[in-house]
Image (cartoon, rainbow, N blue to C red):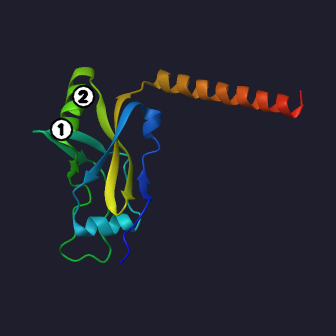
Amino acid sequence: MAKEKGRALVAQNRKARHDYHVESTVEAGLVLTGTEVKSLRAGRATLTDGYATIDNGEVWLRGVHIPEYDLGTWTNHEPRRARKVLLHRDEIRKLAAKTQAKGLTLIPLSLYFKDGYAKVELALASGRKHQDKRQAIAEREAKRETERAIGRRHKGME
């Protein structure tokens, strides 16, 4: 069988960039069981309630829902179990320092296969308040409007 190449997106947390201010991201591997991998290859996962914690020098992904594999037997997995995240010790130390000092949260942005391996993109993020969300939307709309005006001007419509 030929080795897989490229990146195949399984799930994405679109609401995360709206609800949180993302400071930095890191790519990490996941420890999964066989039925979890088969379920992910079928494109079934939900990241909306997911977050990561650092316990005893290990990073754990919690709240991510990977449904049971339809053709699985008694060896099927629990849909919302905690999954171990694979990172280097130095990366874990840096993430732990930032989450404790600044009060940041680790949230999953996307779950994908890269060259045949299951990966998760974790983000160091701080929560946005309702006012911040409205301000971000207003800035985005203002930027769009200026780009439209520039485009109309270049086309000679104004």
Give the labeled residue for mark 2: 99
Question: For the residue marked with disc 1, what is the amino acid?
Answer: Ile
> Quick check: 34 above or below 28?
below
Give the labeled residue for mark 1: 54
Question: For the residue marked with disc 2, what is the amino acid?
Answer: Thr
> Quick check: 137 above or below 119?
above
Find numbered disc 2 in the image and state the secondary structure of the residue it sits on. Answer: helix
Q: Are marks 1 and 2 in contact (CB under 8 Å)?
A: yes
Look at the image and tell me whether residue 106 can be seen. Answer: yes
Instruction: Specify the quadrant that holds the N terminus.
Output: bottom left
Earlier sequence position, callout 1 versus callout 2:
1
- Name the side, left or right, on which 65 lies relative to 16: left
Task: Locate residue 42, reporting x and y percent.
Answer: 40, 68
Q: Residue at x 32, y 74 (%)?
A: 70
Q: Residue furthest left?
A: 56
Find numbered disc 1 in the image and state the secondary structure of the residue it sits on. Answer: strand
